[in-house]
Image (spheres, rainbow, N blue to C red):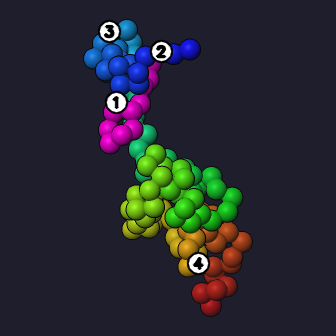
Amino acid sequence: RFVHDYFVIRYVVRTFGETAGIYFNGKSGADTVSLNSEFSLASQRSVLVSVFKDSLSPLNKHDVAARIRSNSLGHAAFYMDILLTEGVIVRIDETHYSHVDNAFKGYNIEEIMQ
């Protein structure tokens, strides 16, 4: 059983970890610890890109909120807007979104364009 508070461990790893080969990176409520000094911080954005890319079915705001730390519909909408603006996801109906690679699989784009 682990008896120390999360924030005690966070402080110890952040302050003294490098001398023991444990590397810490924390940003916006997302803490990452690694044994590799060259690791990159997994952001909410990159996590959501993977979620959309790996999803076999389209996702709505509630699905996205359930996958982020805050569980907030507002945060979900914020991140989804970023991904929409970047062209990573597309809206496929009134409430659902999909990764561009998955959204319209099976459609013959050339045929539609004629």
Query: Magenta segment: does it hold 79?
Result: no
How many numbered marks have been drawn onto this rendered protein structure? 4
Circle number at residue 19: 3
Q: CA distance from mark 1 to mark 2?
A: 23 Å
Q: Which residues are magenta?
A: 24-35
| Image height of 86 relative to 31, above or below | below
Q: Nearer the viewer, residue 75 or 110?
A: 75
Describe the element under mark 3 as helix, strand or loop.
helix
Judging from the image, what secondary structure is the residue with disc 1 in? strand
The residue under label 4 is 93
Q: Which residue is mark 1?
A: 25
Residue 45, given in percent of the width and then of the height, sits at 43, 51
Q: Count neighbours of disc 1 (C-alpha within 10 A) and say few if under 14, some if 14 to 19, many if 20 or more.
A: some
| Distance from the alpha carbon under mark 4 to that under mark 1 | 38 Å
Residue type at the position of mark 4:
Asp
Label 4 Cα crowd, 10 Å radius (few <14 / some 14-19 / many 20+): few
Quarter of the view holding residue 43: top left
Residue 83 shows up from this direction = no
- Whichever of labels 4 and 1 marks the residue nearer the N terminus, that label is 1
For this orientation, the residue located farthest to the top is 20
Q: Which residue is mark 2?
A: 3
The residue at 39%/38% (across/down) is 30
Q: Amino acid at mark 3?
A: Thr
Identified by mark 2, the residue type is: Val
Return the disc, 2 or 4, that comes first in the chain's sequence.
2
Q: Position of residue 16 (x, y in %)?
A: 30, 13
Locate the C terminus by quadrant.
bottom right
Q: Amino acid at mark 1?
A: Asn
Which residue is situated farthest in the left direction here? 15
